[in-house]
Image (cartoon, rainbow, N blue to C red):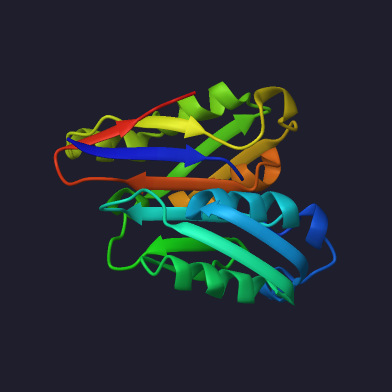
Amino acid sequence: MKRLILAAAAVFTTATAASSQTDPMMLSSIPVHDLSLDGGTRDVLAALAEKYHVVIGVYGTSIGAESNAVHLLFKSGTLGEVFEAIVRADPRLEWKQAGNGAFHFVYRGALLPLFGITVHSIDLEQPTKAEASGRLSQIPEVAGWLRDHGCAMDEWIAGRRAAEWGKFIVHSRDSALPALFDEIAAKSGTYFWSAIQYSAAPCAISVRP
């Protein structure tokens, strides 16, 4: 079965603590000093998101190993240069900055079809991690896509522990699904999310609270 694991963990990048005075589209110029990180690609990206309070999302279809090993050692540079080093270490990925300022790492030539949908409307009023997780697969556009493609979805809200989530509200209208994940990630203070499909059809998407 095709297995799609959603690890949604962050929301909007335009108002992040480390970069509140920075133009969102200039976040890749954030200076980096004495940075040393080792681990799988997604673990390293999650650590960067938390350290610099910028939203990072990873999505696509991955065949093979879940994550490449990444070893980063930067005496001085910029966040954009760190991202370039990451995609050299894991060339399956390319990175881009979304219009809201979030950074997206996407599997080259392996887009995630679910992420082509637009969410007409969703409202979240101070959700817990478990509530936010459960609501994702209930979004009508998401539920319809899953039904039409014979998929079941399992969502895993990653990042901070439930007790550490800040209180926030989401009133989203006509948003692309990645933008919705960006917003939840930024407002919850988790900053990182990923949505990865690991195999071919048929489709199973795993939910883990």
Q: Nearer the viewer, residue 47 or 124?
A: 47
User: Residue 78 lies in what quarter of the image?
Assistant: bottom right
Seen in the image, is 34 located left or right of residue 39?
Answer: right
Whether 199 is drawn above or below 16: the answer is above
- Relative image position of residue 21 (x, y in whole percent): 85, 66
- In the image, what residue occupies the spot 76% across and 54% down? 16
Q: Is residue 198 at least partly visible in the picture?
A: yes
**Residue plotted at (42% across, 65% down):** 90
Residue in view at x 54 percent, y 51 percent: 39
Left or right for 38, reference 143: right
Determine whether, in the image, residue 106 is placed left or right of residue 179: left
**Which residue is at the far right?**
21
Q: Quadrant of the N terminus?
A: top left
Report the side of 81 relative to 139 (left or right).
Answer: right
Residue 27 seen from this side: no
Q: How many numbered marks, from 0 up? A: 0
Q: Give the camera-side residue of 18 and 45.
A: 45
Q: In the rendering, at what x and y percent does residue 38 appear?
A: 59, 55
User: x, y (%) of residue 174?
Assistant: 47, 51
Residue lying farthest to the left in this orientation: 202
Along the viewing direction, whichever of 85 and 23 lies nearer the viewer: 85
Residue 126: % across, % down: 68, 28
Would you place residue 191 above or below residue 135 in this image? below
| Residue 124 vs residue 103, the one in the foreground | 103
Q: Residue at x 27, y 29 (%)?
A: 152
